[in-house]
């Protein structure tokens, strides 16, 4: 038998082994299983490599082992049963949002997401404003500063931030910086040297044991959170890098949405940070009352839940909350997302809403930052348009906002893209806001973005080039594993 025949036999046996793994051991959903089988069949060598990078899954048993007793942080800190009783009283006094009590209950029971109504919210849509505010709050910190970001870059903004953190650490303030090892793969070791020298701490999430190489593309920490003194919190889409200030020529102006929250909802961010830190760090961070102030000064009256989801949770909590919001819509749905790769449940919810007379509008970026995801996104737009959904392509720079507004009454802002990866494979967190004033403000922002967008019509979509259709079809087949 020739060497070529031997190699072919080995490849065939590897493909059979992977096929058995995908079908019988991994127990994926049918769509994902067929996608992997097609890849292994048509591109056997490259398919094997792709499986090693994108296909590996951490089993629930392994996740539980990794998490250890971190879940106790939330369970011990947040008394779920007591909160259920309290919440029903709060909502009975708030008739405007009493209709969302079942959604609040779902988020509470499946995701330990407490409802608080003593919050104030500031909305940022431009990077300079967000980071100027963040630096000011960092400079005013009195006890601790906790940060988790997916992307951190060693550029002008990145150095400005770490310098401000190092200054506070030198003053005796506790500083902990958690960054994702894949998202921040280009970050040099020296970036944190000043912070470490000042007494601050940093750690990478889910790093590789092989230096400079990380094939663990799945299970990334995609959250962008900052918690200061357990009183001030930041959550949204902005990462740390000059492009988020609109300084990247390829993207131009960066359009994102980020929240500054003051009030009881910050404690939920804090609990999530402690879990993430303990999962990534070698040393366990013990609970302390200084991280969870017993009395939180009332800064506003906005009702809010902070919902986290990831591969460590039983349900896809954020996706379920999205679907619950969509089915509750009576008048309008406004959705902004950089990526639109929904599963059948979300597609069905959006189609039913549009066919029921709800004004459904989806805004996407007009330019790609990820080739396959961009064309996979466009492969779903025909079905949306056919159901009466309006599609807008944002043309003033790059749209990275992750917002959902329903009936100008409730809204969601966070870190979650509307795709399978965010819902199932990444660690994410979203704020669900039960406040007409805030929802109306986000709706007004959406309307302003419409003026910088081009509406995609049924005719435009039908007349798109044949090559675009080919790219959409290929990307659509790969969408379950993107």
Image (cartoon, rainbow, N blue to C red):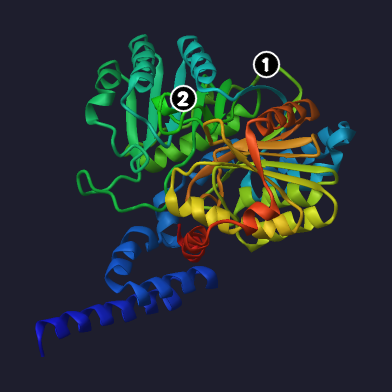
Residue at point 47% right, 44% down? Answer: 368
Q: Which x, y percent locates residue 51?
A: 35, 65
Rendered view: 1 above or below 249: below
Task: Examine the rendering and report whether any part of residue 347 can be seen.
Answer: yes
Residue 126 image-quadrant placement: top right
| Residue 101, x across and y down, in percent | 81, 43
In this rendering, which labeled residue sits more in front, label 2 or label 1?
A: 2
Q: Is residue 172 left or right of residue 7?
A: right
- Nearer to the camera, 253 or 163: 253
- Location of the C terminus by quadrant is bottom left
Q: Nearer the viewer, residue 45 or 113?
A: 45
Q: Is residue 49 left or right of residue 67?
A: left
Label 2 and label 1: CA atoms lie apart by: 35 Å
Secondary structure category for the residue under label 1: loop
The residue furthest left is 2
| Residue 246, numbered label | 2
């Amino acid at each position: 038998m020739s060497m070529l025949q031997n190699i072919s036999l080995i490849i065939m046996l590897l493909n059979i082994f992977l096929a058995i793994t995908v079908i019988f051991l991994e127990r994926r959903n049918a769509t994902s299983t067929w996608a992997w089988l097609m890849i292994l069949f048509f591109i056997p060598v490259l398919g094997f490599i792709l499986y090693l990078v994108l296909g590996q899954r951490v089993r629930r048993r392994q996740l539980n082992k990794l998490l250890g007793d971190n879940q106790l942080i939330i369970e011990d800190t947040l008394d779920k049963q007591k909160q259920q009783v309290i919440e029903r009283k709060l909502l009975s006094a708030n008739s405007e949002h009493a209709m969302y009590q079942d959604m609040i209950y779902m988020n509470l029971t499946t995701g330990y997401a407490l409802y608080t109504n003593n919050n104030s919210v500031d909305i940022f849509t431009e990077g300079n404003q967000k980071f100027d505010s963040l630096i000011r709050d960092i400079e005013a910190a009195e006890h601790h500063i906790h940060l988790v970001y997916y992307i951190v870059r060693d550029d002008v903004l990145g150095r400005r931030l770490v310098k401000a953190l190092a200054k506070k650490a030198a003053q005796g303030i506790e500083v902990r910086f958690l960054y994702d090892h894949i998202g921040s793969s280009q970050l040099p070791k020296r970036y944190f040297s000043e912070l470490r020298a000042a007494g601050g701490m940093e750690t990478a999430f889910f790093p590789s044991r092989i230096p400079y190489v990380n094939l663990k593309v799945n299970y990334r920490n995609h959250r962008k959170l900052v918690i200061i003194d357990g009183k001030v919190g930041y959550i949204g889409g902005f990462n740390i890098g000059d492009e988020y200030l609109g300084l990247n020529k390829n993207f131009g102006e960066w359009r994102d949405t980020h929240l500054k929250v003051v009030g009881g909802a910050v404690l939920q961010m804090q609990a999530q940070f402690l879990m993430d830190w303990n999962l990534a760090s070698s040393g366990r961070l013990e609970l302390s009352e200084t991280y969870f102030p017993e009395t939180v000064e009332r800064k506003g009256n906005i009702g809010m839940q902070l919902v986290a989801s990831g591969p460590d949770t039983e349900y896809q909590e954020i996706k379920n909350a999205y679907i619950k919001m969509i089915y509750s819509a009576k008048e309008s749905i406004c959705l902004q997302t950089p990526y639109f790769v929904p599963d059948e449940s979300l597609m069905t919810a959006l189609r039913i809403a549009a066919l029921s007379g709800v004004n459904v509008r989806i805004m996407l970026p007009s330019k790609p930052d990820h080739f396959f995801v961009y064309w996979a996104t466009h492969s779903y737009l025909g079905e949306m348009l056919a159901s009466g959904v309006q599609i807008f392509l944002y043309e003033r720079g790059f749209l990275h906002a992750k917002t959902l507004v329903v009936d100008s009454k409730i809204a969601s802002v966070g870190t979650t893209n509307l795709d399978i990866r965010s819902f199932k494979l990444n660690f994410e967190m979203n704020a669900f806001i039960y406040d007409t004033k805030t929802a109306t403000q986000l709706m007004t922002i959406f309307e302003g973005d419409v003026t910088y967008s081009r509406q995609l019509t049924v005719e435009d979509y039908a007349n798109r080039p044949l090559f675009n259709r080919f790219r959409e079809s290929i990307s659509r087949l790969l969408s379950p594993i993107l």
